[in-house]
Amino acid sequence: MGVVTPLGHEPDVFYNNLLEGVSGISEIETFDCAQFPKRIAGEIKSFSTDGWVAPKFSKRMDKFMLYSLTAEKKALQDGGVNEDVMEKLDKTKCGVLIGSAMGGMKVFNDAIEALRISYRKMNPFCVPFATTNMGSTMLAMDLGWMGPNHSI
């Protein structure tokens, strides 16, 4: 299992926080939300991609993809899929299936804001980065897996 949640980033921490009734809901800190009537959310805090995602990807990926890729790699590690196992796999038969409600909303919002200025300012990756299957796609690309890739 791999988790990246407001209740913790390790399965044991996450599960214990669930059992203890810990709330992951708090005041929003990521952006100024003074103009909105609701100012609480389940934000992911103290998150790091160190050791999980290459720094060059961390800089250009939406947080949605970073959360997804980190959780997916943690799940592989937890499942015992290490370098030795990876070498033995037929990568044409390895696939990824994830579930997500939304894709990268920040990159999509940034593209809309850029479009107000000029279409030339838009990030060319805004549409693919905003789709839910980008989380599974990035893992498949990172590992060289060429089997089925789905998002539900």
Image (cartoon, grey):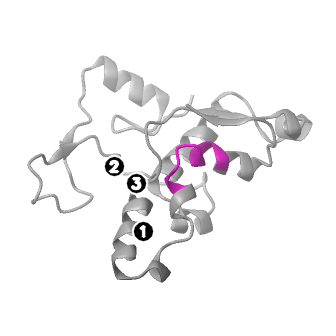
Left or right: where 145 falls relative to 34: right
N-terminal-most mark, 3 or 1: 3
Q: Vertically, is 60 above or below 152?
A: below
Mark 3, secondary structure of its residue: helix
Residue type at numbered disc 3: Met
Residue matched to label 3: 105
Q: Which residues are magenta?
A: 129-137
Q: CA distance from mark 3 to mark 1?
A: 10 Å
Question: In front: 137, or 108?
Answer: 108
Mark 1, secondary structure of its residue: helix
Q: Quadrant of the C terminus?
A: top right
Q: Are marks 2 and 3 in contact (CB under 8 Å)?
A: no
Q: How many residues crowd around disc 1 within 10 Å: few (fewer than 14), some, or many (20 or more)?
A: many
Residue shown at the point (53%, 51%) measured from the top left: 65
Q: Position of residue 110 (x, y in %)?
A: 38, 67
Q: Vertically, is 16 above or below 33?
A: above
Q: Nearer the viewer, mark 2 or mark 3?
A: 3
Q: Nearer the viewer, mark 3 or mark 1?
A: 1
N-terminal-most mark, 2 or 1: 2
Left or right: where 33 falls relative to 112: left
Q: Vertically, is 82 above or below 105?
A: above
Q: CA distance from mark 2 to mark 1?
A: 25 Å
Residue matched to label 1: 111
Q: Which mark is residue 45?
A: 2
Q: How many residues crowd around disc 3 within 10 Å: few (fewer than 14), some, or many (20 or more)?
A: some
Q: Are marks 2 and 1 in contact (CB under 8 Å)?
A: no
Residue type at numbered disc 2: Lys
Q: CA distance from mark 2 to mark 3?
A: 18 Å
